[in-house]
């Protein structure tokens, strides 16, 4: 059982899934040239992030999270100051030329946490506007 991970200058490497997730993540960081303290994740071809950050100390098999014979793009996870806010940066260099669809997926992933907040603000503003217009109608 294996997966293929894309990173660096169009590098593709096969990784064995018959190991503990903690070891898989450690080896992935090593191969991608990341520091042990950095956070790494993987994105599948549909744009779904595997959420390895939450499982970085897990002793479950890597095969319980990743699908065998699939391709994944390695991502570095940057945490913002806001709680729960993350930015994903591809570890695949020049991905915008070789995989242009990744550009839009990464933008969506990085802004995903901020969208609900924008929706709440819009709904709150709409509610205020509606109540103001209702008050004006009542006072006439």
Image: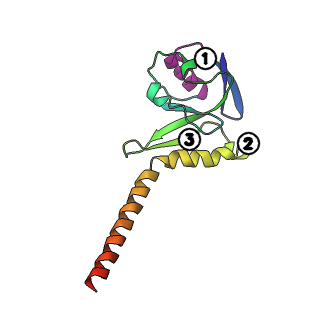
Give the residues in magenta. Answer: 17-32
Q: Is residue 23 magenta?
A: yes
Secondary-structure class at tag 1: loop
The structure residue drawn at horizontal position 71% and vertical position 34%, both measured from the top left corner, is: 10
Residue 112 in sight here: yes
* Residue position for label 1: 17
- Main SS, magenta region, reads helix
Res 126 quadrant in image: bottom left
Which residue occupies the extreme right position in the image? 98
Give the quarter of the figure containing the C terminus.
bottom left
The structure residue drawn at horizontal position 44% and vertical position 29%, both measured from the top left corner, is: 54
Q: In this view, does 43 lie above or below 127?
A: above
* Residue position for label 3: 89
Closer to the camera: disc 1 or disc 3? 1
- Mark 3 neighbour class, 10 Å CA radius: few under 14, some 14 to 19, many 20 or more: some
* Residue position for label 2: 98
Residue 130 drawn at (x, y percent): 36, 71
- Nearer-N-terminus badge (1/3): 1
Structural distance between the alpha carbons of marks 1 and 3: 24 Å
Task: Indicate left or right for 47 with 77 as reference.
Answer: right
- Nearer-N-terminus badge (2/1): 1
Secondary-structure class at tag 3: strand
Residue 37 in sight here: no
Res 34 quadrant in image: top right
Res 1 quadrant in image: top right
């Amino acid at each position: 059982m294996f997966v293929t991970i894309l990173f660096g200058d169009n590098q593709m490497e096969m990784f064995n899934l018959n190991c503990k997730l903690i070891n898989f993540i450690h080896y992935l960081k090593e191969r991608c040239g990341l520091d042990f303290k950095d956070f790494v994740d993987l994105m599948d071809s549909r744009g779904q992030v595997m959420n390895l950050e939450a499982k970085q100390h897990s002793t479950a098999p890597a095969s319980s999270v990743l699908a065998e014979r699939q391709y994944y793009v390695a991502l570095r996870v940057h945490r913002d100051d806001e709680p729960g806010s993350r930015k994903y940066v591809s570890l695949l260099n020049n991905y915008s030329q070789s995989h242009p669809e990744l550009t839009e997926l990464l933008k969506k992933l990085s802004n995903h946490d901020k969208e609900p907040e924008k929706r709440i603000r819009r709904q709150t503003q709409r509610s205020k506007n509606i109540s103001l217009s209702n008050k004006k109608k009542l006072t006439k």
